[in-house]
Image: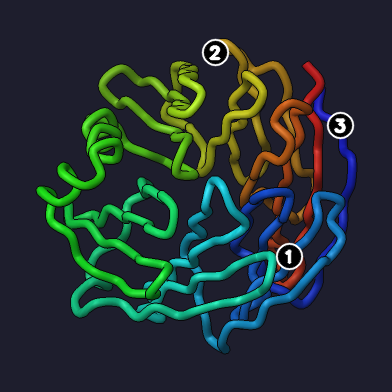
Amino acid sequence: MITLKKECLLEDNDIYILEYHKEVLIVNNNYSGIHLYSKDLVLQNTINIFEGILIHDVYTNPHKNEIILYCPDNEVFVYINLDTSFQKTINFLEGMDEYGLSNIYFWSGNEVIFLCDNKTYYKIDIDFFSLQKLSRQVIKKDYPSFHTLLSDLSEYTVLNSDAETFMCIDKNYNELFYLDYTNKIKSSISFSSKLGHEVIYLQGVFLVVHEEFIQVIKEGEEIARLDTLTTYIFLRVRKTIEKRGEFIVLRGDKANPQNCILSRYEIIC
């Protein structure tokens, strides 16, 4: 069963980014910055960055309240400390915007390593807010745990990750699986061709997101479903409190993208 816990309507904001990190819900503020909400969907802070920013991905530090925004249209990364609102823009290196970043990244201390789709590597040093290109040999020598992770994931398609957990597809065996490297957890299900546009893992179940509905799948069987009965379609889903089975849903109005709904639900199995 899926129970609605909290919901709010947001108007005049074309929200397309949704992340949850350290009890902070992150959404874009149109094309000028980000809004920070509590898990109770109360606005806590607004961080203005610059007009025209277009955020493709949000990379999170597993251990601290800091994030990096990936903005290839603007050819920049933006580092933000969520506690202090301090921010720093880091320009792309020449030619970097030709390739998209992989969903796989590694955040250790003040260093963040990104894998580019053309199999090259980049490092952001937060102490100096510098960006440099690295060779595979450097990755293997200086970041052996990340190199091992890349080897383990090389045969799979990574749908999403948060530096420590990964949602992957093994197309050879029609298998969708969740990997938690920190806690040594692996869970998998078979998938059909209609996988949906987003999948998350929460409290032993997979949430498969389609525009018109969200499936809750356990051991290969659908045990619950959340349908939208209005013009609002499901865009993104993020988990909040793992042990309580809570998650946040972003819905957008097909008739007016400036209107969005944020909802917090709880799964009761």
Q: Which mark is residue 36?
A: 1
**Spot occupied by residue 149 in the image (x, y as percentages of width and height):** 29, 34
Q: Mark 2 and mark 3 in contact? Answer it, CB < 8 Å.
A: no
Q: Whole-percent x and y of residue 24?
A: 72, 55
Determine whether the residue tagged by mark 3 lies in a helix, strand or loop. strand
The percent coordinates of residue 15 (x first, y second) are 66, 66
Q: Could you give the CA–CA distance between mark 2 and mark 3, rounded to whole angstroms?
A: 22 Å
Image quarter (top left, top right, bottom left or bottom right) of the N terminus: top right
Q: Earlier in the sequence, mark 1 or mark 2?
A: 1
Task: State which tag comes first along the sequence, 2 or 3.
Answer: 3
> How far apart in space, not on screen, are marks 1 and 2 (Cα)?
35 Å
Q: Dot 3 surroundings within 10 Å: few (below 14), some, or many (20 or more)?
A: few
The residue indicated by pointer 3 is 3
Lateral position of residue 109 relative to residue 8, left or right:
left
Write the residue at 19% across / 48% down.
139
Q: Nearer the viewer, mark 1 or mark 2?
A: 1
For badge 1, the amino acid type reads Leu
- Mark 1 lies on a secondary structure that is strand
Which residue is drawn at the image coordinates 21% and 32% (left, top)?
A: 151
Q: Is residue 34 above or below residue 228?
A: below
In the image, is residue 212 above or below residue 138? above
Q: Quadrant of residue 192?
A: top left
Q: Position of residue 190 (x, y in %)?
A: 44, 17
